[in-house]
Amino acid sequence: DHTNADTLRTPIVAVLGHVDHGKTSLLDKIRGSAVSEGEAGAITQHIGATDIPLDTISGMAGELIDPTDFDLPGLLFIDTPGHHSFSTLRARGGALADIAVLVVDVNDGFQPQTEEAIDILRRTGTPFVVAANKVDTTPGWNPQEGQPIQKSLEAQSERAESMLNENLYEIIGQLSDAGFSADLYWRVQDFQKNIGVVPLSAITGEGVPDLLTVLMGLSQRFMKEEMAIDVFGAGEGTVLEVKDERGFGATIDTVVYDGVVRNGDRIVVGGQEDPIVTEIRALLQPRPLEEIRTEKQFEKVGEVGAAAGVKIAAPDLDRAMAGAPVRVVRDRPVEEVVEEVKAELAEIEVDTAEDGVVVKADTLGSLEAMANALREAEVPILRAEVGDIAPRDIAVAETANQDEHKAILGFNVDLLANAETELENADVKLFTDDVIYQLIEEYETYVEEKQR
Ligand code: GTP
Ligand code: MG
C-alpha cells in the first residue's frame, strides 16, 4: 500500500513500567475503544505490537485532535511485559522505540522497574510521557467512560480530586528526584524540556484521549524527520524474542524499523556466536484482532514494511539473540551485511577483566544494561553472555581468582536443569533477579558480609 519510496513511517511507541501497573490493560483499552468506535478493521495486530492508524486515534481523541495537523500514519505500540526486559528494545546502538509511555500506578508511584525504565530512557535519550494510571481507584471516584481527563475531573468531588492530586504530585516529585522536570501535561509548554504526566485509567478509558493526543503531538513535532524512510529499502529490525513455534522451529519475533522485509529474503541475524545468514521461509502475523502474545495461529504474509512487528521463520534461528540486529541482504554482498551486524554487536561487547564475576542476561540490551551498572558499581566482569545459566558458566565462575568473584549474576534468566547439580557441587554463588539494581545490591551485600 506504499506508493512513493520516501514516506513517513509509523513512530514506534514502547509501553514500559513496573509489573501490574497496567501496560497491557492500557493497550487493550486503546484496541477495545477502537473496536467500539467501529474501527476494528483499522487496527492491525502485529507480532509484539499493535498498529493504530491516525484516523482511529483521532476518532478516539475526539475534540482533542485535529487529524489535519498530522501527516504521520499513526502509532505502533510495543507492550513490554514486566518480567521481560524492555532493554531489548535497542536498534543501531540507540533505542528502538522513538518514544515511550511510562505507566505508573498512581497509588504505588515509582517502583523498582519504574526506576529501571527511567534509567534506560535517560541513557538512550528516548522522549517519554508518564501515564499516571488507575485514577479510577481513587476513593469516591465518579467514572467518566472514555472522557478526556479535564471532563472527568469536572465530575469529581473536591475530596476525590485532591486525593488524586496528592498522588500525582508524589509522582511528579519522584520524577524530579530522578532528574526530570515534570508537570501535568496540560501545564507543559515544551515537551522537550519537561515530562508530561497524563492522569488516566486503563479500565474506564478516561484520560486515554489525552495520552493519544500527547503522543501524536510529540511524534509529529519532534520525530518527523526521523520517520522519513525508503519504504522499498532493505529491511532492518531488532529481535524481540526467539521462540520455538510448532511447525516452524525456532522463529524470531522482530520489530522492523526501516525498509521492507519480504518472504524469501536472505537475512543476517545477530547470533550467539557468528552472525546467522539464512533465508526467510515464512513471515507470520497473528490472525486479525486476536491477542498477540498468546496467539498460536498465524497468517502468512508476503512482506512487511516499517514500522511493524512480525514473526520470521527461517532455518538456523535457534542461535539468534534477543536484542540482536536483523538485516535484509537484498542487493548487497552478504559479507558486507555480515560485517555490519558484527560491528553492531561489537558495540555492545562488554569489557571483561582477568578476574571478575560471570554475568548472564536474557537479551543483548539487558546484558549491556547489566554491564553498565556493574561498571558503575566497580564490579569487574570475567565473562558476560546472553542465555540461561549452563554448566559451563559454573565452570567459568569457579576459575575466578578472588573468592568474592566466584559468582554468577543472572538477570531474567533461569538455571538450566542440567546445571543444578553442578552448582550444588561447586564453590560458586548464584544471584538471580529481574531488577538490575536489586541484583547488584544482593551481590554487594554478599561481598560485604564475606569481608566482615
Ligand atoms: P505485566 O505485564 O505483568 O508487567 O503487567 P501490566 O503492566 O501489563 O499490568 P496489567 O495491564 O496486566 O494490569 C494489572 C492489573 O491491574 C489487572 O488486574 C488490571 O485489571 C488492573 N488495572 C490496570 N489498569 C487499571 C486501571 O486503570 N484501573 C483499575 N482499577 N485497574 C487497573
Ligand atoms: Mg502486561
Image (cartoon, rainbow, N blue to C red):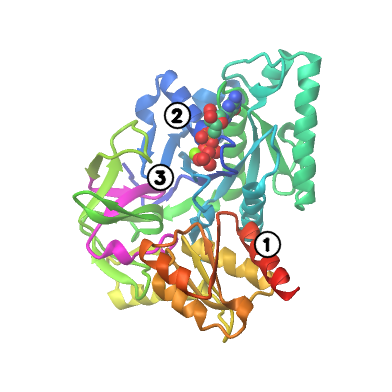
> Can you identify the residue that label 2 sits on?
31
Q: Quadrant of the C terminus?
A: bottom right
Residue 262 seen: yes
Res 374 → quadrant: bottom right
Q: Does the residue at mark 1 contact the one at mark 3 (Cβ under 8 Å)?
A: no
Position of the N terminus, as image quadrant, is top left
| Nearer-the-camera pick, 56 or 2 | 56
Q: Which residues are magenta?
A: 301-324
Residue highlighted by disc 3: 48
Q: Crowding near pointer 1: few (<14 within 10 Å), some, many (20+)?
A: few
Please count the marks in the image: 3
In reply to whether residue 314 is colored magenta, the answer given is: yes
Residue 441's disc is 1
Report the front residue among 210 and 1: 210
Q: Secondary structure at mark 2?
A: helix
Percent of width and height locating residue 448: 73, 70
Q: CA distance from mark 3 to mark 2?
A: 14 Å
Horizontal side, residue 314 vs residue 56: left or right: left
